[in-house]
Every structure is written in C-alpha cells, then in structure tokens.
Amino acid sequence: MRKPRVESCAPAPRARRLHLLGLAVAAASAFMTGGVVQAGDLADVKAKGKLVVATYPLIEDSFMAVDVEAMRHSGLALKDMRDPAHFKGIDLDLMKGFAESLGVALEIRPELAGYGDLIPALDRREGDVAASSFAITPQRLATADFSTPYILQWDVAAVRPDSKIKSIADLKGKLVAVIEGSSHFERLKALNLDPMIRLTKYVLEGYDAVLEGQADYTLLESRAEVGQPVSAQYSGLKVAVRINETSYGIAMRKGSDLKAPLDAYLEGLRKSGELDKILARHGQGNVTKTP
C-alpha cells in the first residue's frame, strides 16, 4: 500500500526569507519601544474619545488650580476629580483647546505625589500628556518628550523685602524652601550652594515659610526684574537673584506621536495672538519673545 503523502509545512525559500525579514522588523520595532509594540498615542486618544491630562493641581495657581468650592460641593476627593470644569488656569485652557482640535473630550487626572510623579504617571499610562507648569529640564528630557515651550520665565530666588541676599554667592549655606520633585529641586544640585533644605508640597507653602522667617528664600518662576515683587500673586516677596531662564512645556511619553499635532496647535495659538490672551487672562502677561 502506498503511504500517504505528507506535505511539508516549511515555507518556500523566498517566502521563508520574507518571513524572517518580517520577524526581524518586528523585533527591531519591539526593541525600539522597550520590548512592547504599541499603537500610536494619537490613535489611542481618538479611539477612546478623550485626552487624559496628568497634572499636579494647586489651590491657587495661574497654570492649573483646583476649584475648592466645586470639590466641596461634589463630595469628591481631589484624586477622584476628572471634570475640566472643576479646574482653571493656563494649562487647562491650552489642553481644552488641544482636545477640541483633536475632536475629543478632555479629562483631568490629578497626581497627588507631586511633580516628580508626573512622568512616571505617563509611563504607567495614567495620562496621555502632563500639563502642570512643567519646566523643561535635561533630567526630564531624558525620560519624556516635551512640546515646544509656550512660556519663558526666570527661576529666581525670592526673598523678604528686607533680605540682604543680592547674588548667587549670597545663597550659599542658606535655608531654602523648595518643592520636592520640582525642577527647582533638580537644579539646586547643579548650583553647588550647600543649602539647608526645607521640603514643601506647594508653592504657597514655600512662600509663607519665607514671609514668616522660616526660610531665607524660596525658588519661584517670575518675569519680574531684580528687586521687584515676584508677581501679583506673590507680591510679598521680591526677586533677589535671577538664576537661569526656564521654559514650560507639555510632557508626553518618549516617541509619542502627539508631539507633532500639539506643536502645530501651540504654533497656531502663537501666530494668532491667542496664546498672549490666555497668558494675560491668568496674570502672566504677554509673551515677550518666541521660544
């Protein structure tokens, strides 16, 4: 009896070469994305119909502030608040407009551990972007991508009006109130000031510490000249020293394809003058030069 013919399952030589090439491309793609092949962030945002913004909201802030009355009336804890109507500020206005440009809704997701948890939150996919008066620093650029800057300011040492601090050298060994995980905390190391550090959670906490004599200075962002009040919001302190120029941007995961449409959106606001209006509406004045 003739034995049944067994067909080989091995692909023909040319098909096998194409198969191996496909495997190589897939492996390279997986390597470049940390071993996980993922759909683009833009497609994901559109598929779920919303842009999720990770943020570290404050009580009183020009960039992202929570409406305390809304929180009280809703009975929600801050970590559970999602409605954009319960927040206000420059970053909120920018993200509302960006979400509209993508044709999706906006959701706010507060991160309460501080600025240092915003990029990890993106990596945990708890947000599509992070918008929270987020300074662009070399350390952050190593682990996240940022939009083009939308505002330029100075990092300044803010002091009481009667302070004798007038130079960076005068800051050496002094007690500084600084937010843990903030860009200011990162930059203290590079200044070699050997400071005594009082860690805070909020800008207002550091501001009050200096006013009440519990710290020699705090680090803030300001456009004010040396010797002038830091801002209308923090008028009780003056700018003692301008330390370095800083810029804010919107953060996203490394390689995110949200960067191109977000940069285009911000450029449109800049060209139309709408960015100036948003900044001025929240007490930050007009942009003085193009980032």
Image (cartoon, rainbow, N blue to C red):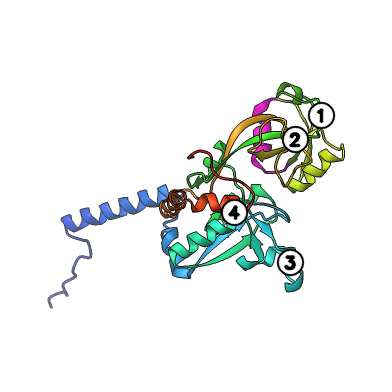
195 in relation to 92, above or below: above
Given contact means CB atoms under 8 Å apart, are the residues at marks 2 and 1 in contact? yes
Q: Of the residues under marks 2 and 1, which one precedes in the sequence?
A: 1
Which residue carries the number 3 mark? 77
Label 1 or label 3, whichever lies nearer to me, is 1
Mark 2 vs mark 1, CA separation in Å: 9 Å
Specify whether 266 is left or right of 151. left
- Which label number is shown at residue 235? none
Say whether residue 185 is magenta. Answer: yes
Element class at badge 2: strand
Badge 1: residue crowd in 10 Å (few <14, some 14–19, many ≥20)? few
Label 2 or label 4, whichever lies nearer to me, is 2
Given contact means CB atoms under 8 Å apart, are the residues at marks 1 and 4 in contact? no
Judge by depth and name the residue closer to the eye, 252 or 67. Answer: 67
Badge 4: residue crowd in 10 Å (few <14, some 14–19, many ≥20)? many
Which residue carries the number 1 mark? 163
Judge by depth and name the residue closer to the eye, 229 or 178. Answer: 229
Given contact means CB atoms under 8 Å apart, are the residues at marks 4 and 3 in contact? no
Specify whether 206 is left or right of 149. right
Which residue carries the number 2 mark? 238
Which residue carries the number 4 mark? 90
Q: Of the residues under marks 4 and 3, which one precedes in the sequence?
A: 3
The boundaries of the magenta stretch are 179-192
